[in-house]
Image (cartoon, rainbow, N blue to C red):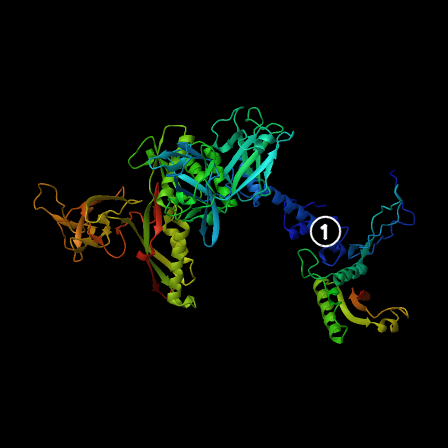
Amino acid sequence: MTTTIKSTELDFQTIKENLKTYLKGTGEFNDYDFEGSGLSNILDVLAYNTHYNALQTNFALNESFLVTAQLRPSVVSLAESLGYVPDSKKSSEASIDFSINADGITGLVNDNYVLQPGEVVCKGERDGLDFTFSNRVALKATRSPGNIFTFYPLSTPDDPIIVHEGEERKLQFIVGSSTDAVYVIPDKDIDIATAIVKVFENQGSATSVGGEFSLFTDLLDASTVSSASRLYVLRESPNAYYELSFGNGTSLGLAPNVGNVIEVNYLRSNGAAANLVRTLSLTSTITLLGADQSITIDPNRITLSVATNGGAAGGGEKEDIESIRKNAPYQFAAQNRMVTSDDYSALILKKYSTFINDIQSWGGEDNPDPDYGTVFTSIVWKDGLNATTITNTRHGILALSDQFQIASFSLTFTDPVVAYISTQTFFQFNPALTGLSQSNIRASVDQSVTDYFEENTGKFSQTFRQSNLLTEVDATDPSVLSSRTSVTLHMRIIPQFATTRKYIVTFPSPIRDPELSDGVTVYTSFFTFENQRVQIRNKINQKVQTSELGVIPIEYDIQATTVLELVNENGTIVGGGDNIGSYNESTGTVTINSLTVQDVSGDKNYFKLFAVPANQSVINSTRNKILKYDADESFTQAIIVETR
Amino acid sequence: MALQRVTPGLSKETRVTTKKKFYSDIDLSFTPKAGSPDANGNYSGDIYKKLDARAVVQAVENILLTNTLEKPFQPEFGTNLRGMLFELTTDYSESFITTMIENSIARWEPRAKVLRIRYYAGDELIRAGIAKFGSYVSNEVSIIIELEINNKGFSTTINLNRFR
C-alpha cells in the first residue's frame, strides 16, 4: 500500500490528487476519479479542509515575521519587539512672533509674565478648511522699553515660538489596584509627540486649578532608566488606538499609585492637510495677572505673525506599513545611539521623517579630503519647506546628535549635489515587426528611458547601469531589435555675475582620458563673457612634443589635453583664456581657476558643465551626490533595418 | 505427514471465481451495516457500498442535483437544475433542460449514456401514475432519465418541486 499523502501541498487540486493517490493504493473504492461519485464528494470535503487549514497556517506564519506580515497590527507589534515605535500622525508646526504692547495698561505690575501650554490658540485656513494651532510649551515675556512684552519659549529662550496644529484633547484615568494597567486612548489621530502626561495625587488635586502634579516623559526621550525615572510609553495598539503604560515601580521607573489621576493632554492632528497654512489669527483670550485682578488684554494690542514665510510645515500621516517594515530594522541597529554613520541617518529620519525625503550620512574619513571626527549629513528636504523651517530642523538635528552620540563627533550638514545624466540612444527598428509607427515606437522608447531613470535615480546611493537601461529599451517592443547609448554627465554651476572667482566641480565618476577621443571631453554650455557668447572646453589641438628632449629633429603631435580653454562660438580663444583651468581624470574634478561670468543665456541662473565619464557602463552616486536624468539633453533615434 | 486444510464443499479441482466489480463507491445515504449496537444503542458498522451500475446511477444523481458554483474549486461542475425552478414549464424549457442534462452527464460521467429524458409536470404526473390521484401536483415536475450503463438500461428520476 502506498502512503503518498504529501502534507506540504497547499493547492486544493494537489491535495485532492494526493488523496486519490492514496485511494489507488487501497483498492477498496474505485470511483475516486469520477467527479460525480460520492467518494469524490468526500475527497472534496477532506481536501477543502486540508487546504483551509494549510492556508490558515501559512497566513499565521506570514504574520509572525516583519518582512512578510500584511496586517498593520502584526507589523506594528513586530516592530515594537525591535524597540521601534511607529510614527503617529504628526502635527504641522509654524514658528510665530508673539508680543503684547502694554503701554498705557495700568495694573500690570510684573516685569515677567508666563503663558502656559495651550494658552495661545490661533486659527489658520487652507483650501477652505480651518485649522487650530496652539503652543505646547510655556512662554515667557520680559518687559522691554516701551512696555512691550515679547514672548519666547521659557525653557529655550533662543528658539522661536512653535505652535502645533491640532485639536487639544484631555483624558483622565483613575489608577486602580491592577498591576501592569494599560490606559487606552481611543483616538487614531493623536500626535504622540504632543502628548503631555501628568500624574496627580488624587482627584481633588486633578480638578483644582493649580493642583500639584508629576510630569512624566516619553521613554523614547530617556537616555537612562532608573527606579526614580518618571517615564511613560505611548504606543499604537492592535485596533489602531493608542495605549499608555508606565514603569513597574521599581527598576523600570515609577508607576502611578492607586488613587492617582493620570491626565493625558494631546493634539488630535489633521496631519499633512495643515501644511502651508500661511497666516494665523489669535482666537484665545490672553489674560495676564495684575496687581489686584487678572487683566484681559485687548486683541488690538497683540501682535501675532507667522515667522516662517512658507507657512506651517512638518505635518504628516501615520507611518504606513512599508515604512515601518523598512525603518524598524535600521532603528534596531541604531539602538538609540549614534555610533555609525547609518545610526545618524536612522535616528534623524525617525524624528524628522515628515521634513525629509532622503538622507545620507558618512564619516569624514570617507571624504575625498579626509576630515576625521566629523560626520557629514546630506538631506533632501520635502518640497515646500522654507529656509526658516530648514534652519530650525537643523538646530533640532544638532540637539538630537548631542543627545544620542556617544563620542564627540561634530555633525556637519552638506547640501546634496545633483549630477545629471543625459543619454544619446540609438535603436535598431524593424517596422515589419510591429503595427505601430516609427514615431510611436520612439515615444515608447523615450518612455522606457524615462521610466528607468525614475525608478533608479533621484535618491542617494543609487547607481546608473547602462546595460540595465538598454535592457529596458530592448524590451519596449518586439520591433526594437537592439540598442546602444552614450552617456554624458553634467553639473550645474550657478555663477556670481560680474565677479571673478574660482570654480571647482567634482563629478561622481572619473572623466575620460582626453587622448581617447578626437572630440572634447569636458565642456560647458554657452554663457556671456565680455559681451561675447563663449564656452569652456578642454583643448583638443594642443601641440605636444613627442620626441625626447635633446633629440633632433624635434617632433610634435596635436593632442587633446586636460587643459581648459575659453572660446567663442567660432572656436577662437577669448579674453586670454588659453589656460583657465584643467580637469583631473581620476578624481573627476574640474577646476576653473578664474572666471568672470557676465550673464547666462535664457531664464536660467546657471550654466552647464558637461563631462564624458571614463566608464560609460556605470555611474555611482556616493556621499551627497544624487543622479538625475536630464531629458532636455537626451535623445533617442531609430535606425531602420530589415533584419530580424 | 503434513496436515491439509480442506474447505468443506471444495475439492482440489474446484475453481473459485469472483465476479469482478468494476465500479465501487460509498453509499451516500451513509446507512451503517447491521452490527451490534454500542452502549448508546448506535450501530457502528461500516457503511454500505454502491457497486457497478448502482454506483454510476448515484454519480449521475449527484451531478444532476448539484448546482454550478457549488463545488469548491470546480465552479462548472453540476447541472444547475434547481436554477430552472423558476422558469416556465414550456417545451422550450424541456429542450433546454435536456441539453443541460445531456451535456453535464457527457462531461462529468463518461460511464453513462443518456438514452431518453421524459418530463411530467402537473396533472401529467397523475395520468402517468407517478403521483397519486388527488395529490397537489401543480408545482411539481418529474424528470425521468433513461441511461445506458455497461450495455444495460437504467433510469433515475429527479423531482423538482416548487414549494411556494
Image: B118 above or below A422: below
Seen from the viewer's position, the closer of residues A444 and A640 is A444
Query: Does residue A303 appear in this view?
Result: no
- Residue at the right extreme of this rendering: B9
Left or right position of A612 against A295:
left
Left or right position of A281 against A525:
right
Q: Looking at the rendering, which quadrant does residue B82 occupy? A: bottom right
Q: Position of residue B113 (x, y in %)?
A: 75, 67
Q: Position of residue A239 (x, y in %)?
A: 60, 43
Q: Position of residue A135 (x, y in %)?
A: 46, 39
Query: Does residue A552 appear in this view?
Result: yes
Q: Secondary structure at mark 1?
A: helix
Say which amino acid is labelled 1: Val
Please state, as top left, top right, bottom left or bottom right, where the C terminus of chain A lies in the image: bottom left
Q: Position of residue A394 (x, y in %)?
A: 37, 38
Image: A525 above or below B138: above
Q: Looking at the rendering, which quadrant does residue A444 occupy? A: bottom left
Seen from the viewer's position, the closer of residues A252 and B83 is A252
Seen from the viewer's position, the closer of residues A644 and A179 is A179
Q: Residues within 10 Å of mark 1 (few under 14, many from 20)?
A: some
Left or right position of A561 against A82:
left
Name the residue: 54% across, 29% down.
Answer: A213
Seen from the viewer's position, the closer of residues A471 and B16 is A471
Residue under circle 1?
A45
